[in-house]
Amino acid sequence: MSSATDRQRLVAIIKERSFQKGGAVKLASGRTSNFYFNMKPTMLSAEGAHLIGKLVSEALDGEKVDYVGGLEMGAVPIATAVAAASFARGRATPAFFVRKQAKEHGTQKLVEGLGPKDSLAGKRVAILEDVTTTGGSALKAVEAVREAGGTVACVLTLVDRKEGAAETFAKSGLPFKSLLTVDDFAD
């Protein structure tokens, strides 16, 4: 399939499995909306995961990233799909995720998924997100990557709600990309 066909198919899957309209829903940003994207059913479906991995991996071509990851929970299935797709494309890019808060047991790490000899220090990272409203959640991951010594190459979201994220990232000097926007779901 072509990228355009893959993108159209992903929109159809999201409409079927993850897009809800009507009623008031509170978003992670604290705002209330009459539409909502619960991306987990799409991200965790076989075809959805495949398309997400392929499309995000292609969207990152030219970014020269060493790692992909983001804030738990939304970024975990995306980063995993991208890592698998990048390997299949011959450009293995490992994944990680940032906990919302470090565990109080075990290694007590905020950044998870790295091997014992791996580090984000000196690495270029793409921060991934499922749905972006204002960009606040992704900025938490950006901060953790920077604290670990990494450089954020870009922030990439599956769906941009177009409610301020682009402006937030621009103010922070971060390149921002989206596979889709809320406009792709207007009927």
Image: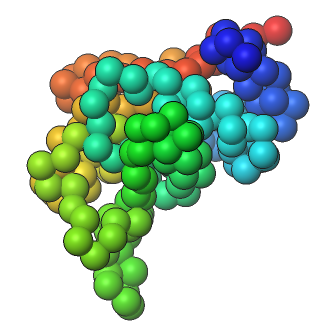
**Residue lying at 32% horizontally and 84% vertically, measured from the top left:** 107
In this rendering, position of residue 149 left or right of residue 125: left
Please identify the quadrant where the N terminus is shown. Answer: top right
State the scheme by which the image is colored. rainbow
Image quadrant for the C terminus? top right
Which residue is at a point 29% across and 43% down the rendered structure image? Answer: 66
Query: What x and y, as percent, mark residue 141?
Result: 33, 50
Q: Residue furthest bottom?
A: 105
Q: Which of the 4 image quadrants contains residue 138? A: top left
130 and 62: which is toward the camera: 62
Q: Is residue 183 above or below residue 89?
A: above
The location of residue 157, given as percent across then percent down, is: 49, 31
- Asked if residue 50 lies left or right of residue 17, the reply is left
Can you see residue 82? no
In the rendered image, residue 175, in percent from the top left (x then y), is placed at: 29, 22
Question: In which quadrant of the rendered view does residue 169 lie?
Answer: top left
Q: State the residue in front, 104 or 156.
A: 156
| Residue 148: quarter of image | bottom left
> Which residue is pictured at 42% across the width and 53% down the height?
95
Residue 156 makes an appearance in the image = yes
Relative to residue 34, is residue 91 drawn left or right?
A: left
Residue 69 position within the rendered picture, expressed as x and y whole percent measured from the top left = 41, 49
* 107 horizontally vs 14: left or right: left
Q: Residue at x 22, y 55 (%)?
A: 120
Q: Residue furthest right?
A: 16
